[in-house]
């Protein structure tokens, strides 16, 4: 053994403990700035204890212990005392060379160590560190000044991946990553250090990134273009040339991008995992360039170039296609051709990609679910002589003990809301018996209303339930048609006596109940309702020989309610006249005396039409 040649004093003084780790640690910063030929020189020595031993003997021991080829000059007579931990063989040799003015040189695979002919200035050492940990398919890396080629060699040995590196690269890698998928960790680390990584058929190719030279007067700017395993793209760029970014995406993804112009502009952007279409739209925005896709090939060119227009079919989910073109901004429609396809409720957009993107973004914002509203309308006629009884039965009678009492006045003029009801109640001196909010109708409201109808107090004209979409008009028409005979006389002149011609025809008169409602839902779920009721009723009894008189009651109102809240529309008063004749059979037809056996009555009455309106929000 080599230590048998040492004198007893040196042998007794030597205490050398070298423990090699499975994880190599590399270094290449020394006074000579040379690099060993392989990774065996970077084996890790966990602990070195040397008390006052000859440097030549110590280096011989290191060579034998680590199976290295070292030629040591006989003129080296210096003694050393060392106590080191966690250091590589190459770091240790470089350190000793700097401290003791030694020269290092390579002759084939042999390291030659000799005393320097001239004195050198010792420099402070920056030891290289590389830790690689592969656990459960997750990779952790720690790199400090690691040569790129040695890093790749270690990664190949540790992970089993096929990695090829540009042999002309002479740079060092820095960075630390923890618990990432193997390929993703390698790609992020190398790209962070200005290298491009391309994965082709299971082989990773490492070369200098075309973005690595991007910089400014303040120095180097870190640029990152990452094409992830799911084909999404992540960007972290500062003042990078757009053309270089496009080429880098092509290099990494193998997706062909053909460029017809030079884009001199630069871009600063940071995105995470966007698809290629979105990435291209962001990069080319506010430039004179656009892109179109044909098959799997992307073409980038000037917006004015022939053939750069593209098309996209937009399928609408909630709104009709017929009105979309009218609401698009003019800045879009002036540069876009829009074709409506009614059968598919779709739009075909034809134009440059940037304009199509603006149009689809606008359409996505307005293509939302339209709220649907159910309107409950209750139309009631209340006879004027029965108003007091109606009030008593519909809420003023506190003996009924409603837990939530809602009193609705049928004779209120115009539109009434919750404050109006309370104010009217206070004016009549009965406010203490009323609830202070309209709220929702009592559950037995309609039951009592039907009872009042049987007693002749009210007449329920209509109780429609109408559902419609937000902003759309809903209409309900209930009509009765009456016919009467219309007789006309026409004089026909002749040479002799004029002849009169009489003709008869049927004419019709319609009496109808018409209700038009247009609801609007606000962002806070309040419902604004435009209501237009029309009620036309004939006056008196029907006579086929006389056209009937039609009384019409029309109201236009706009009210705002919350979901399930009821409001009253009233004030439409109608006066009616009823005539009736009765006589005793036979005796009532006698002249003069028959008047004693006949009677003629004429009654006048007033009624008020009241509408109870309750909207319900079905969906939004």
Image (cartoon, rainbow, N blue to C red):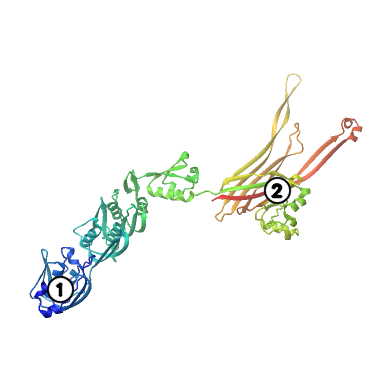
Q: Residue at x 78, y 44 (%)?
A: 605
Mark number displayed over residue 217: none
Q: Nearer the viewer, residue 393 or 238?
A: 393
Residue carrying label 2? 447
Which comes before the other along the chain, label 2 or label 1? Answer: 1
Q: Position of residue 488 (x, y in %)?
A: 73, 28
- Quarter where residue 23 is shown: bottom left
Could you say whether the residue bearing mark 1 is in a helix, strand or loop?
helix
Q: Position of residue 498 (x, y in %)?
A: 75, 22
Classify residue 20 as left or right of residue 181. left
Total numbered circles: 2
Q: Can you name the residue that lies furthest to the right here?
A: 593
Q: Nearer the viewer, residue 26 or 34?
A: 26
10 Å crowding of disc 2: few (<14), some (14-19), many (20+): few
Q: Is residue 542 above or below residue 196?
A: above
Q: Are marks 2 and 1 in contact (CB under 8 Å)?
A: no
Residue carrying label 1? 97
Q: Looking at the image, can residue 373 be seen? A: yes
- Quarter where residue 106 is shown: bottom left
Could you say whether the residue bearing mark 2 is in a helix, strand or loop?
helix
Query: Separation of disc 2 and disc 1 at Cα?
Result: 108 Å
Q: Looking at the image, can residue 573 be seen? A: no
Q: Position of residue 40 (x, y in %)?
A: 17, 64
Q: Nearer the viewer, residue 61 or 448?
A: 61
Q: Can you name the residue that lies furthest to the left here?
A: 74
**Can you tell which of label 2 and label 1 is closer to the viewer?**
2
Q: Can you name the residue that lies furthest to the bottom here?
A: 9
- Quarter where residue 187 is shown: bottom left
């Amino acid at each position: 053994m080599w230590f048998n040649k040492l004198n007893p004093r040196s042998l007794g003084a030597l205490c050398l403990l070298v423990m090699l780790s499975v994880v190599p640690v590399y270094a290449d910063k020394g006074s000579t700035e040379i690099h060993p030929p392989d990774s065996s020189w970077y084996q890790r020595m966990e602990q070195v204890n040397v008390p006052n031993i000859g440097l030549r003997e110590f280096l011989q021991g290191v060579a034998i212990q680590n199976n290295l080829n070292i030629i040591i000059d006989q003129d080296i007579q210096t003694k050393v005392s060392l106590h080191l931990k966690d250091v590589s063989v190459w770091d240790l040799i470089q350190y000793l060379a700097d401290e003791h003015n030694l020269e290092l040189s390579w002759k084939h695979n042999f390291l030659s160590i000799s005393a320097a002919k001239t004195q050198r200035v010792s420099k402070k050492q920056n030891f290289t560190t590389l830790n690689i940990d592969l656990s459960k398919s997750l990779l952790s890396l720690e790199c400090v000044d690691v040569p790129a080629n040695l890093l790749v060699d270690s990664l190949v040995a540790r992970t089993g991946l096929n990695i090829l590196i540009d042999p002309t690269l002479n740079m060092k890698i820095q960075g630390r990553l923890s618990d990432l998928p193997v390929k993703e960790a390698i790609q992020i680390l190398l790209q962070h250090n200005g290298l491009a990584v391309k994965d082709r058929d299971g082989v990773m190719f490492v070369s200098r990134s075309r973005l690595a030279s991007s910089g400014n007067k303040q120095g180097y700017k870190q640029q990152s273009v990452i094409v992830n395993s799911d084909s999404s793209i992540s960007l972290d760029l500062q003042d990078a040339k757009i053309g270089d970014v496009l080429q880098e995406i092509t290099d990494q993804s193998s997706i062909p991008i053909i460029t017809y112009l030079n884009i001199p502009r630069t871009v600063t952007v940071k995105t995470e995992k966007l698809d290629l279409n979105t990435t291209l739209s962001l990069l080319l925005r506010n430039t004179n360039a656009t892109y179109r896709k044909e098959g799997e090939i992307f073409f980038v060119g000037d917006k004015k170039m022939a053939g750069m227009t593209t098309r996209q079919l937009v399928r609408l989910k909630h709104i009709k296609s017929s009105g979309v073109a009218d609401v698009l901004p003019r800045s879009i429609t002036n540069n876009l051709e829009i074709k409506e396809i009614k059968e598919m409720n779709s739009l075909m957009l034809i134009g440059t990609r940037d304009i199509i993107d603006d149009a689809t973004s606008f359409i996505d914002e307005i293509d939302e679910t339209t709220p649907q509203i159910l309107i409950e309308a209750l139309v009631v006629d209340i006879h004027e002589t029965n108003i007091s009884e109606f009030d008593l039965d519909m809420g003023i009678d506190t003996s009924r003990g409603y837990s939530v009492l809602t009193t609705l006045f049928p004779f209120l003029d115009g539109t009434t809301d919750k404050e109006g009801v309370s104010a009217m109640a206070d004016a009549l001196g009965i406010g203490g018996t009323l609830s202070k909010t309209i709220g929702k109708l009592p559950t037995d409201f309609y039951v009592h209303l039907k009872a009042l109808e049987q007693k002749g107090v009210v007449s329920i004209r209509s109780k429609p339930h109408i559902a419609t979409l937000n902003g759309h008009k809903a209409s309900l028409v209930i009509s009765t048609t009456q016919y009467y005979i219309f007789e006309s006389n026409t004089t026909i002149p002749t040479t002799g006596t004029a002849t009169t011609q009489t003709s008869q025809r049927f004419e019709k008169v319609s009496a109808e109940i018409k209700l038009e409602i247009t609801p609007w839902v606000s962002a806070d779920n309040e419902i604004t309702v435009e209501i237009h009721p029309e009620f036309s009723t004939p006056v008196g009894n029907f006579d086929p020989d006389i056209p009937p008189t039609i009384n019409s009651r029309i109201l236009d109102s706009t009210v705002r309610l919350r979901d399930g809240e009821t409001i009253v529309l009233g004030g439409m008063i109608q006066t009616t006249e009823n005539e009736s004749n009765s006589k005793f059979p036979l005796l009532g037809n006698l002249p003069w005396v028959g008047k004693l056996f006949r009677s003629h009555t004429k009654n006048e009455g007033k009624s008020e039409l009241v509408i109870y309106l309750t909207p319900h929000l079905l969906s939004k």
